[in-house]
Image (cartoon, grey):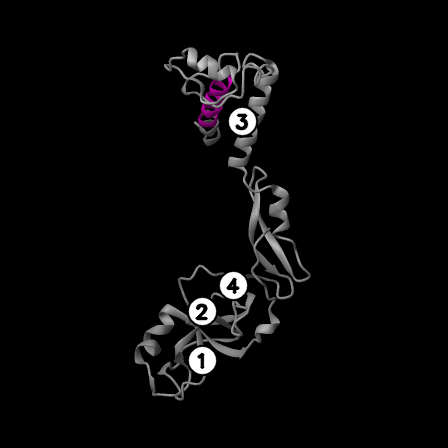
Amino acid sequence: MKLGEIVRMVVGGFVVYAVLATCGDGDGTSRRPGVRRDATDDALADAGRVEVGGGDASVGPDATADRESPEDPTFVETAESALDAVLDALQDPVPEAAAEEWTVPGSRLRPRLLTAADGARQFYQWWDSQRAEPCLFQTAGDGVMRCLPLAQLSVSPSYFLDAECTQRLAMVSKVSCSTADPFSAAASYELGCPTRVRVFEVGAKLGAVTVYSGSPETTCTKNDYMTDTGPTQYDFYAVGAELPPSSFVKGELSVVP
């Protein structure tokens, strides 16, 4: 059984219950099964009081004289319309027009949409038309939310190409799923709250190299393991200049009213 059918059955049961609870006896009062009604109840009903016979509220004998009957076709159509509206809200809580307004293309960023074979469509990712590549909003090196390249190259925080540990090294696993070679950018991540992403140009792809580890501020020594086995597990790249954060489109968070 489909989800929509299950929801329809459940909500339909509540609608039927509400119909039975509100229609009552036809004399302007309502009565629950198994609740005895006596002369006091009739007197209260005639006086326009509430809580007749333990049932729902009433405002007098004529209050529901014009109430539609469950057998009335108009009443049935109204109930069905209400049920359809509830189901629509449950199964499609975001109006299509509103969803489209949230992914408005700009002068540079364009929304990429994922379209299903049956016509369904949703936002997938942003496309940077200037750089001709997808991007993701992250906190850039200047602390501002910007749409940064989805770089698969990672700038190592501890591996370098020189004995002074100043020439940074970018690397990617040989078993990476990325097909973006040549890569457009490399990224380094500065841990913090929030983590900041710095983006660099990608230099030449390297072959066998001597890898050093450490930092310019402390010690810098040759890393024999990465020098000997690294090229069998990773592809190494030289790291170019850092790209200024302002070269990427910034964004601001807001709440939809």
The amino acid marked with disc number 1 is: Arg
Do tag 2 and tag 4 residues touch (Cβ < 8 Å)? no
The amino acid marked with disc number 3 is: Leu
Numbered badge on residue 198: none
Within the image, what quadrant is residue 125 found in?
Answer: bottom right
Do tag 1 and tag 3 residues touch (Cβ < 8 Å)? no
Residue 129: x and y in percent read 64, 62
Label 3, label 4: how many angstroms apart (C-alpha)?
45 Å
The first of marks 1 and 3 along the sequence is 3
Instruction: Give the class, few, some or many, for how many residues have Cα within 10 Å of label 3's Cα (few <14, many ≥20).
Output: some
Give above or below for 154 relative to 39: below
The first of marks 2 and 3 along the sequence is 3
The residue that appears at 33% across and 86% down in the rendered structure is: 221
Residue 169: x and y in percent read 44, 77
The N terminus is located in which quarter?
Answer: top left
The first of marks 3 and 4 along the sequence is 3
User: For this view, does 97 lie left or right of residue 26?
Assistant: right
The residue that appears at 42% across and 17% down in the rendered structure is: 53
Residue bearing mark 1: 168
The first of marks 4 and 1 along the sequence is 4
Q: Which residues are magenta?
A: 10-23
Numbered badge on residue 195: 2
Residue bearing mark 4: 150
| Magenta stretch contains residue 31 | no
Q: In front of the other: label 3 or label 4? A: 3
The amino acid marked with disc number 2 is: Thr
Name the element at disc 3. helix
Q: In front of the other: label 1 or label 3? A: 3
Residue 239: x and y in percent read 49, 77
Label 1, label 3: how many angstroms apart (C-alpha)?
63 Å
The residue that appears at 64% across and 49% down in the rendered structure is: 101
